[in-house]
Image (cartoon, rainbow, N blue to C red):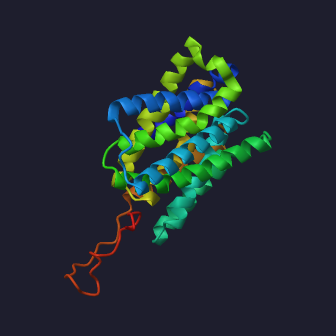
Amino acid sequence: MGGVVGLQCGAALTTRLYPTVGPAGVVTLRLCIAAVVLTALWRPGLRWDRATLGTAAAAGTLLAVHHLSYYEAVDRIPLGAATTMEFLGPFAIALFGSRRATDLLWACLAAAGVVLLSHSGIPLNTSGLAFASLAGCCWGGYILVGKRLAERVPDGRGLALAVMWGSLLSLPCGIAQAGTRLLAPGSLALATAVAVLSSVFPYTFHLEALRRLPPRTFGILTSLEPAVGALVGLLLLGQHLATPQWAGVLAVALASIGATRTPGRPRKPTTPGSPNDTSHEPTAGAPAD
């Protein structure tokens, strides 16, 4: 939840940076500053096996593409609408990872909430919706890859390496769009706040959550983002919600609460070597090697 709130507050702050550096400049500043902070904290180094380096690179690539597409979307459509479309990725993870009827129920309730939350009589920019959808695909992929990275690296060094790679990928885009404006003192100060709120805190919290939660549960919990985005838009940007949208906020919140409070089916006691013994089977989301 700390990650969700930080992401949305940071996204609201970025609207003040768009006139100066543009969406790509915001992403570059955000990721570069976050990479410096995380590298200083964790000192990841490069002495990793190829599989771990590949996983970190995949996570960093997904972060960079997600950020670029998401902020391009926020530049074209309202924050609540962009975040709602972005939820499609976590929703897909929640849906395809379900193994019980109740899991599907909560995922469908969350989806209904998203539909209500995005209900508006105002036409939305088509390219903005497309960018938001791409951001959702990348966020869904990051949930899966981030889970694998969290299992391979037991601390924040993997995250620091991923963000470092993502910042390098975004750098050419930011320079092309903003040039030397990236170094303006006012832009750097505001971008530092955005980086801490939207990258350092959220992704640290997310990685710690992924160590403790299955991807399905994590995916449905992040379905609170549209609701939080709508509230942040109301409080910080003055974006008001209609009655159906508030109903969507409630539906998404109930789905998240239900998903985390639904008890799992208890395991039957087994003895090693018995047909029910799963001690040698890989757990869901665990590395295959």
- Compare residues 85 and 153 and report the one nearer the observer: 153
Residue at the far top: name it.
Answer: 185
Residue reaching furthest to the bottom: 275
Q: Residue at x 28, y 74 (%)?
A: 267
- The residue under the point 39% across, 68% down is 288
User: Residue drawn 61% across and 20% down?
Assistant: 182
Q: Please name the residue shown 61% across and 56% down the image.
A: 112
Taking 131 as reference, is 91 left or right? left
Instruction: Report x, y in % for residue 42.
Output: 33, 36
Along the line of sight, the residue nearer the viewer: 112 or 189: 189
Q: Is residue 229 left or right of residue 175?
A: left
Residue 71's x, y, as percent?
Answer: 64, 35
- Height in image: 144 above or below 203? below
Q: In which quadrant will I find the C terminus?
A: bottom left
Front residue (pair 76, 175): 175
Q: Is residue 279 above or below residue 207?
A: below
Residue 257 x/y as whole percent = 43, 52
Residue 11 coordinates in the image, percent (x, y): 57, 31
Q: In this orientation, which residue lies closer to the viewer: 210 or 46? A: 46
Q: Is residue 240 visible?
A: no
Question: Is residue 27 at least partly visible in the picture?
Answer: yes
Q: Is residue 287 left or right of residue 134?
A: left
In terms of image quadrants, where is residue 100? Answer: bottom left
Q: Is residue 182 left or right of residue 211?
A: right
Among the 4 quarters of the image, the one containing residue 110: bottom right
- Quarter of the image with the N terminus is top left
Q: Is 117 drawn above or below residue 282 in the view shown?
A: above
Q: Looking at the image, how many numbered discs can be counted on the residues? A: 0
